[in-house]
Every structure is written in C-alpha cells, then in structure tokens.
Amino acid sequence: MAKTRATKQGKPRSPAKKKKKRGPDSSADAKKTKTMDEVLGIEPIIFSDAEEEEIEGQDTEHETGIRMEQEDSRRESIRLEFAQLMEAKQFREAQQLSATAVARVVNAEGERLEEPRAIIDAFIQYYNELLGSSMQGRQPVQQSLFKLYHHQSQLHGVPTNSTLFPSPSLFTFYVCCVNILLKRALTNNPTSKLPPGPWRLPLVGNMHQLIISLLGSKSLLPHQTLTNLAKKHGPLMYIEIGQIPTLIVSSAEYAKEIMRTHDVVFASRPQTLAAKIMASDCTDIAFAPYGEYWKQLRKICMKELLSPARVQTFQPIREEELFKLVQGIASNVGLPINITQMVKDSANSIISRAAFGKKCSDHDEYISIMRKALKGAGFTFGEMFPSLSFLDWISRVKYESFNLRSSRIMEDIIKDHRNTMSRGKGGRNEDFIDALLKFHDKNSTDLGLTLTIDNIKAVIWDIFVAGSLSSSSTVDWAMVEMMRNPKVMKKTQDEVREVFGKKGLVDESLIDEMEYLKSVVKETLRLHPPGPLLLPRESREKCEINGYEIPMKTRVMVNIWAIGRDSKYWIEPESFMPERFVDSSIDFRGNNFEFIPFGAGRRICPGMLFGLKNVELSLALLLYHFDWTLPKGMKPEDLDMSELSAITLQRKDDLYLIPNNYV
C-alpha cells in the first residue's frame, strides 16, 4: 500500500530521502484531523524528532512539487478505478467509491477533513469525459456539476492545493449531490435499460411535477398527472418519487406483465410508516410482505372470512342495516339529505356487525380514528427520502397515538368475544373475530398457523378500511352518474322495480336477475375505481419487461384510472355508458386487464365479493323505494365531478338529493 509521512501532529508531509521509521503516533491531536490519506486508506509513516527537525528544513518548493505529484497520482488512481467500474457497468460500486469517503467523514464525529479535492477532481474529470463523449445531450448535468464545484471554490476562496471544504458536512453535501447527479445521468442514458420517463431533478426526482400539478390552476391529482405524463413517455414509465424508484403502469398489456407474467416478482408491498404502526408491523393482509405468513393468512381470509358461503351468511345483516337506511331517508321525504354521509354510516354499520357481531359502543370512536389515520396515510417525507427518515418523528407520534386508542378498543372487543366463547354461548352467527380467534387459541389442522392478538387487530383494521370506504364511495359515484344521466337512472329503476315487483318482496337473492344494475356498478368502477393507482407493489428481485430492466425494490403503481379511460380499450371512454357491459364477458375478477378495479393476480382484493354485495343491494333499495331529484335550482350538469385524493377516490363534495316516495 502507498504510504506518506505524518508529523507528530498527524498531518501528512512530503516524502524525503531519509530513513523511514514506523511507530505509534503519540500526539493527542492526531485524532482531531481527518486526512485525505486516511479517507483513501493510506497508512501514515511516523518520524523521530531528529528526522522531523531535518524535514522542517527541506526546501518548500521541492516539498510542494512532490506533494502535487502525489496528489496527481492519487487523483489518477481514483479516476482509473472509477472509470474501470463505470466501463464494467458496476454503477453501484462506482457510487460506493464516493459513499465510502462520505461515511468515513460522518463517522469522524465532526473532525475536519483535509484536502478532499483529489477525490472530487477525479469524479469531476471522469464526469466530464463521460458526459461530454458518450452522453450527448446531457450537458445540463455537466453544467450542474461544474457550477456547484466552482461555487464552492469561490465561496471559500481556496487555491488548487488547499482544503476545498472547511467542514465534513459541506463535503458530505457535495459528494451526495455528485452521487445523485451521477445516478440521474446514468438512468437517463440512451443506452440505459430503464423504461423511459420525464426528466428528474437532483434530490427530489419527479416530486416537482406532482406538486406543481396539484397546486396549479387545474389542481390535478397524482393519478391524473401520471396519466398525462404517460401520454408523453409511454405506458411503462420510470420516475423517482424523492429517492424512491417507481414504475408507473398505464396499459392493460403492461398490467398483465406485472400481475400475471411476473406476478411472483411483484407480489410484495412496500412497508409504509402508517401500515407498520396501524397494522401491527404490516401483519395484515394488504401490506404483509410476500412470503409464507402472507400465503397462510390469505388462505384464512379466503376460506374463513370472505368465501362466498361466509359472505352469504351476512345477508340478514346487510338487509337489516339497509332497511334502516331506507327508513331514515323516508323520514325526510321532500327534503334535501346528505346521501353521501348516510351511505357511509350504513356501510360502517354493516362492517361493524360483520366484524364484531354487533354495533359496539365504541364503534363511532373506532371509525373516527380510522378516518383521521387515513387522511395522511400516503407516503411520508421519510419514506420518499429514506436517508431523512428521522424527520418522520411527528407522523410516527401521530400514528402511535391513533394505534394506542384503536388497540384499546379492539382488545376490549376481543376480550368480550373470548369470554363469550369460553362460556359456550350459542345462538348467534360467527363473526370475523370469532373466526380469527380459532387460529389464536390453537393451530389450524389445515394451515398450521397461529395468529397473535396483534395479527387479528391488523386483519380487522384492513376489513374496516377496505370494506367501508370503497363500498360507500362506489354507491356515491353511481348515484351522481345516474343523476347526470336521467335515461340511465330510469332504465335502472325500471329494472329494479320490475324484478322486485314480480316477487312482491325485496330480496338480495334477486339482485342476480338485474343485469343492467350490475352494468351500472361496473361502469362506475371503470370511471371511478376506489383505488385509482391500486395499492403499490414492490419488486422482490431484478427482472426484465419488454427489454426494460426493472431493478430490485422498485415500487410499482398500476394506474387503473388511466386504463379505464383509454380509447384504446373503450369506445367514448369519458362517457357513462353501462350498455358497454351488457352481454359482455368482461368482468372484474382479474382476467380482463383493461378492467381491474380490484387488482389482479396474487394480490387481488380478497374482499371483492363482500364489497360488491353491499354496493348492489344499497343501490337496488335506493332506486326501488325512492325517486330522486336535485335540490331546487340545480341541474344535472351543475353537479361537480371533482375528485378528492384520499385512501379511496371520492367526490370532492357530498351529494345532496331530495327523495320522493315510490313505494
């Protein structure tokens, strides 16, 4: 290994022709300075007092010349190593070359770094060659590097052979910027195998485009902005949300690649802060990482909680709660009512009774906690910028508070269920908690999985979030679309009233005879899917799609909102036309990738059937019992169709309608 000399103060000196002697540094000040040699792993050579006195008298010019030769040699060595890594396409190792230096500076606990210019010059020189020759059209990156470089040099007024940055933090910032610019240059290289995408800024990636669209005159939401970007860059688009590599899928063909061809590769989920805290460290069905636990939990949900037979047992609950909704509306005939809120309350009551067996006293508080927690349940700042995750402490405290309160409620309910089960009380239908507790007290003979109380709480949390919000928002959107399309409203009402009228009763089993009503629900889900980007997936390993290389740990968002409005798949895609689904084989079970409101593949929503039953019966009863008009002075075209971005896609404004009795 190359060696340079060090004085008793620990500073490197130029080589001399005197005899070299190794020995320990006895100076207490040696730890106060971090040298470039130490950063590069060069061992110092220690001199005796006599040798030091002789060295002090050496010619300064000669010493400076030798020092510059050494610096040039180090610079060239680093440049060559960096070039070799780049030519071998070992991009990660190339970045680590500078990251190692940063780590050593940070670990020095604030010690001053001497002369980092050698390593910086090596990067600048190679970037100049890289960007100037093999990367034509990327001059903005080159200019950014040199602007930053010259700005720092002028700011500190430093000559060529002196310290460039007076503090480790400044040096760290510089090298981090260099790394980000390098990564951006590489991922935008015409020879790169990443999918195409919009130009990204240092540090923030494509965040600026999402923020500008949201705050602009049109106030575009993320799924709308991503739809517009995909029209320019293609249906398989690469962006960076902060520091997170993200793949945006906006076509049925690529959705099929993700959810069927490479389903196992993209079967996992990114673990968000909200999911970690509210869903017991992501042990729920929605965000649990792909693996044996998730597989067994999904089997439990599909077999014990959400199977067709189990969903059918909840028919009395649905009918009772929806008849209460009808009674509440009937008491306000002729008056404007907030149909949005009334449908939400009804959906929450159905979920509560299915999960707990009854509407418990803490039901309203649990729902309130859920809604507050979901308001900010998107990616936090620390999730977009993992290196700054410590800044998420405010969000963490907020979620911990919500989790503490919701856990207390759930523990009381679970305790009550266990006491009831231990006393052997019968005479009631088994609810979700009863079914899950069977896997807590002993291993299932079929699955061999034991659920903890925290696991049970996480699953119930999922059911409330998905079951109540998605169902109520779909009913709301369907009513709005029918009010805007009176012919569709009349045709649907005629069908519902004819089917129920023939039997002389309102029965959920008759819904299967209402083909047009089912088409209205499908058309609503096409235009207004509850999750416009679905829940994000995450690649478990590197894979290739249509010649593009998708790195491991890339997040994937499938823009089903864009797919549902694409003229490639739909005639008059912006029009509400339920007729397109009449006598059509297209369904939402994950086989037709132009229509996947519940997802597809291994991660398809397990509660799809439960939610659809609630939506269809709710609409049937609303249309059977009442005729609907808009408040005085309003016309159908006056209804605002603006969307509100939340955990589910909702209308910005609540829907107020005037009910009039039919029967």
Image (spheres, grey):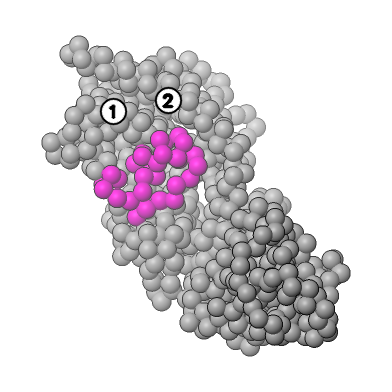
Q: Which residue is mark 2?
A: 407
Disc 2, SS: helix
Q: Position of residue 187 (x, y in %)?
A: 55, 72
Q: Residue 656 lies in what quarter of the image?
A: top right
Q: Residue 163 lies in what quarter of the image?
A: bottom right
Q: Is residue 310 above or below residue 409?
A: below
Q: Residue 354 lies in what quarter of the image?
A: top left
Going by the numbered disc 2, the residue's amino acid type is Ser
Q: Position of residue 106 (x, y in %)?
A: 63, 56
Q: Is residue 321 above or below residue 244?
A: above
Magenta highlight: main SS: loop
Q: Quadrant of the C terminus?
A: top left
Disc 1, SS: helix
Residue drawn at the location 60% of the way across and 71% of the way down: 22
Q: Position of residue 64 (x, y in %)?
A: 79, 82
Q: Which residue is mark 1?
A: 432
What distance separates the C-alpha of mark 2 from that of mark 1? 17 Å
Are there few (<14), some (14-19), or many (20+) residues within 10 Å of tag 1? many
- Relative to 514, is 309 on the left or the right? left
Q: Residue furthest left?
A: 445
